[in-house]
Amino acid sequence: MWNRILKITLHLFLCVLLTVLTQIGGVVYLISVFSIRAKAKKRRWKVAGVFIGVYLVATFLIVPLVAPQFGREKIKNSDILQAHSVFYTLANRNYVRPELNITLGEIAIQFEKNNSGIKLIYLDANFPFIDGFPLLPHLSHDDGKKIDVSLIYEDSKGQITNKKPSVSGYGIYEGPKGLEFDMVAACKNMGYFQYDFPKYLSLGKIHGSILFSEKGTRELAQYIVRQDAIGKLFIEPHLKSRLNLRSEKVRFHGCRAVRHDDHIHFQLK
């Protein structure tokens, strides 16, 4: 009896985890489990094989066809607009409303014109289905209107690079310096312990020789806020000050969210 309860609990845990990570993974997992007989030999391997096959077909063939019924479409990758990691594509976290897709392409083109060969690198966008379905760990990102993009970095020679400092794209911060206001400390002192939680999501530091590019990040932020379709841009207050970003669209996201000095968040009006 306890063995059966343990198995059911494990299945439920995996179902929830895959749903949280990919939106469709939990459903695909249940299909895989129920498609293989309970007493089949090497059942775990067969379930895993079915899951991988069905999940890949769903992600790359079915979901892109159905998502437009929910007002969303897959981000149109190009030579100058790409996901930081294949994870964001495999996990179906790369869906946006058509207006944002167009705007992303325009920002990437404008930025690359002044920075030859430099790509606009995006992180979490939105899931393909259902407004209000949470894309954790974000508080928003649930309506197709939001996206995170990486900050811009430069190499030891001061040249802008496509390299980023962490495996996931999150969690390596460009913190406040000198007399810059420390919103991170302020939020944590008010009890918002989660404010710098993404430091646990970096999955490791890479490209240790690269440095934050003030010039490149300022230029990217300016291109973003100049877009008529964009309503808000979130970045940490000390970076707003350091980069001299004066647009009314540049806002503070609030202590209930997480810190934004490892990425830029922007969204449609």
Image (spheres, helix red, strand yellow):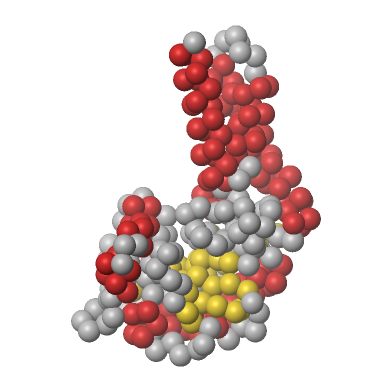
x and y, in percent, of residue 239 in the image: 36, 79
Left/right of residue 237 with respect to residue 41 in the rendered view: left
Nearest to the observer: residue 19 or residue 50: 19
- Residue 145 visible (yes or no): yes
Q: Residue furthest left?
A: 178
Left/right of residue 91 with respect to residue 261 in the rendered view: right
Q: Which residue shows up at 43% across the image and 71% down it?
A: 254
**Relative vertical location of residue 177 with respect to residue 33 in this rendering, above or below:** below
Q: Which residue shows up at 36% across the image and 50% down it?
A: 203
Q: Which residue shows up at 28% across the image and 62% down it?
A: 208
**Relative vertical location of residue 43 with respect to residue 69 in this rendering, above or below:** above
**Relative vertical location of residue 89 with respect to residue 186 in this rendering, above or below:** above
Q: Which residue shows up at 52% across the image and 87% down it?
A: 248
Nearest to the observer: residue 56 or residue 117: 56
Quadrant of the image occupied by residue 161 = bottom left
**Relative vertical location of residue 257 with respect to residue 233 in this rendering, above or below:** above
x and y, in percent, of residue 122 in the image: 52, 64
x and y, in percent, of residue 159 in the image: 36, 77
Tell me the quadrant of the picture where the C terminus can be found: bottom right
Q: Residue furthest front?
A: 190
x and y, in percent, of residue 124 in the image: 52, 59
Q: Residue furthest right?
A: 69
Exactly how many numbered labels are in the figure? 0
- Residue 159 visible (yes or no): no
